[in-house]
Structure formats: C-alpha cells, structure tokens
Amino acid sequence: MLKTLFSIAMRHLLGRRKQTLTTITGVAVSTMVLITTISLTRGLLDSFIETIVNVAPHITVKGEKMELMPVNLLERQRPEAVAFVDDNIQKQDREEVANYRQILNLFSSPTYRKQVTVASPYVASQVMAVKGSRNQSLLLKGVEIEREELISGIQKKLTSGDIALFEKTPNALLVGRTVARDMNLELNDQVTIIPASGISRQCKVAGIFFSGVNAVDNSVLVSLKLGQIIEGLPANKVSGIALKVVDPLQNASLARELERVTGYRCITWQEENASVLSLFARIGYIVFSLVAFVGIVSGFGVANILVTTVFEKSRDIAIMKSFGFSALQLVGMFIFEGFMVGLVGALVGGVLAVGSINIFASLPIESSQGPLTKSGFSMSTNPLYFLYVIGVTVFISSIAAILPSAKAAKLEPVKVLRESNL
C-alpha cells in the first residue's frame, strides 16, 4: 500500500514537471539566500569576537577608583545629619592607576597566575599629530612593547618596520595604518606630537601596523616612559592595565573579583563592546525571523501546486477512495508530496549556498565591516545554520500540504464520479 501511495505521489509531481520545477526553484533560491545571509551576519560576529579576543585586552583595569567620596560627608559619623556642598567647582581628577607595579605583582602571584596570563600597563593620551600641512587628533598609547606583544601580537601585524627599530629609536612611534594613510606617513618620517599640555615633541615613525580593528588602527604606540612624559604622569602611575586571561569568554566573575582586590574599575571586552554586540544580536533576531517568513512564502508555493493537483486529480482521488484508500492515507500522500518538494528544493538551495558562500569569501576586496576592516567577507560555514534553514523549509512545506490534503480527503467518490464525464 505504501509503495502504491509513493508511486502515485511521484506521478503527481512528475506529471506537472514545469510547475513542480518552478516551485522547487523558488524554494531553492529562498533557501540559498537565507543560508548565505545567516552565514554573512554570523561570520561577521564570529570574526569580530575572534579579532577582539586576539587583539584587544580581555579585561582592562581602568584608573577609576571604585570607592568614590560620599555625597554626604557626615553620614558615617552622624547618620541623622545632612551636609550640602554649594558652588563647589574643582578640577576633575584624572583617571590613573597609582603604584601599578604592586598590582602587577598581585597578578603574578600564585592566586591569579593561573587566571591572568599577561598584564600590560599603558598610558592613554589624546594628542594632535602634525606633519607638514596635515594634522590629526588621535589616541596615543604608551606601552611596554614586550608586554604589548603578548597582548595584541603587534609584531605580526607590522606592515613595515620592526620592534627592534622601535626599541632603539628615541621617541619612536608605531603608527596604525589608518593614521598612516590619512597623514601620508611612511617609515622614518618625522611627526610632531602635541599633547594637551602644549609641549610638542618630535617623534619618528619606526613601524606601521594593521590589526583589522578600526579603533586600534586609528592610534599610535609609543614607549611607556614617553607616554608618561607626554601625559604628565610620574613613573609610578599609568592610565590602566590591560589583561589577557585564560578564559576570555567567561571573564565577568574574574573582573568583579579584581575590582574588589585592586580597588579600581575592571571592564571586560564584552562591556567595552556592548553596543556592537547588541547590534549583532538584533541583526541576528531579524535574520532568523526572515527564515520563518520566507519559509511561509515557500510554503504557499508548495500549497499552490498541491491545491492544483487536488483540483485536477479529484476524479483519480475519488477512484482511489472507492478502491479502499482511507482519508488518512490520502492525507499522508499529499503531505509526502509537500515534503518531497520542500526537501529537494532545500537541498538544492543548500548546495547553491555553499557556492555563494565560497564566492563571497574569496572576493579580493577590502571592506570596512562595522568596527573591523577585512579583506573579503567574513562568512561562517557552521553546518547548524544549514540544518536549521533546511529543516524549517521542509517543515513548512510539509505543513503547507495539510490544507489541500484535507480537501482531498473530504471528496465523496459517488458525487465526484457522477459529475465527471465518464
């Protein structure tokens, strides 16, 4: 019986080849577009996380003290008293980490040695860079280059120059590629750095790097000592400490613990990039909702071909019922037809998606994808996305067959045969 139903279902589909092929093509194209779109959006997110984890600190100890001065100065001594400050205008304290070497010793202690792999102090300063008639406001970052190499792998990201030249050149700069392009800088060029204090310094380009993170490539690196001089910090103070940890994806609890033991605010890379990650999440919700909507459209195409089949084959269906085929068997036959159309279309779409993903990934173009600059498009080939889209498409195609199959099951053989031309 099942073999007979299968044979009849295949004859229905093959008997209307043009319409069946059109429906399968529509399902295949929609499947290909959805898989490619998901691959692009998820690939960009995965690429962003991978790049940030490899280039940026996992946790940053900021020069912001956690215990701020209370608003009510008398609260601790006399809870019932209230103090007011009227017209108190004073200079805002600069964010800085004092006695940073003691904190570095804490991170290298047995308590945190297995959790914190690298700790790199830095000094951040907003400066003006001038070369000839060109000038640009940018972030200058003073670092210990050996520790910075362990944080960002700066050596492999140099497009010209090297670390040895940086270390032996007085007032040396490692310049991000964006800055180098905007100011037309090349190796060994002289650049005037003007900090907020107004005391300018002549610096020399010892290297140009490209990390792929736009914010990083729009900055320059100098030695930690030079950074402290430019920012006006003593030798025992820095702007913050960058950390690499063993588990960068599960670092929130460690950051809160380090806040408690250091007294300074500790920010994870997820918190630093919360707005970008939130944007990716919203895009992901939109894309996955499109899967359902496009799948419904594909389902209407499948339902259309089956409704037409029921209309044209009503006489054959009546004969089948008169031969003893039950209504449930007829429903199963039409659902099987919808399943076959959805399955073939989805599988063809999956194959086409593999080709489109490879084409996008191999395009030799450099694109600025949000916070990143990449050569070609970042595409994800996670098989779960293929299974998800194919599964949803096949499911909706099968469900779409219920209405025409129910209509076929309700046909009365005697009435259909009486009204047909025998």
Image: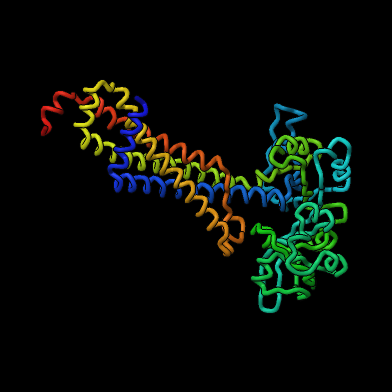
State the residue at coordinates (53%, 42%): 385
Left or right: residue 107 compared with residue 84: right
Residue 235 lies in what quarter of the image? bottom right
Residue 318 visible to an observer of this rendering: yes
Query: Where is residue 404 drawn, in percent x and y?
Result: 27, 32
Query: Where is residue 370 drawn, in percent x and y?
Result: 57, 55
Q: Does residue 47 lie above or below 114 as drawn?
A: below
Query: Where is residue 143 drawn, in percent x and y?
Result: 81, 57
- Image quarter where the C terminus lies is top left
Closer to us: 153 or 203: 153
State the residue at coordinates (72%, 27%): 79
Q: Does residue 111 lie above or below 47 as drawn?
A: above
Closer to us: 28 or 121: 28
Closer to us: 413 or 159: 413
Q: Does residue 105 lie above or below 184 as drawn?
A: above
Q: Does residue 315 lie above or below 232 as drawn?
A: above
State the residue at coordinates (66%, 57%): 213
Residue 200 visible to an observer of this rendering: no
Left or right: residue 331 compared with residue 41: left
- Image quarter where the N terminus lies is top left
- Give the image's coloring scheme: rainbow
Residue 320 lies in what quarter of the image? top left
Query: Where is residue 21 drawn, in percent x and y?
Result: 34, 47
State the residue at coordinates (69%, 40%): 249
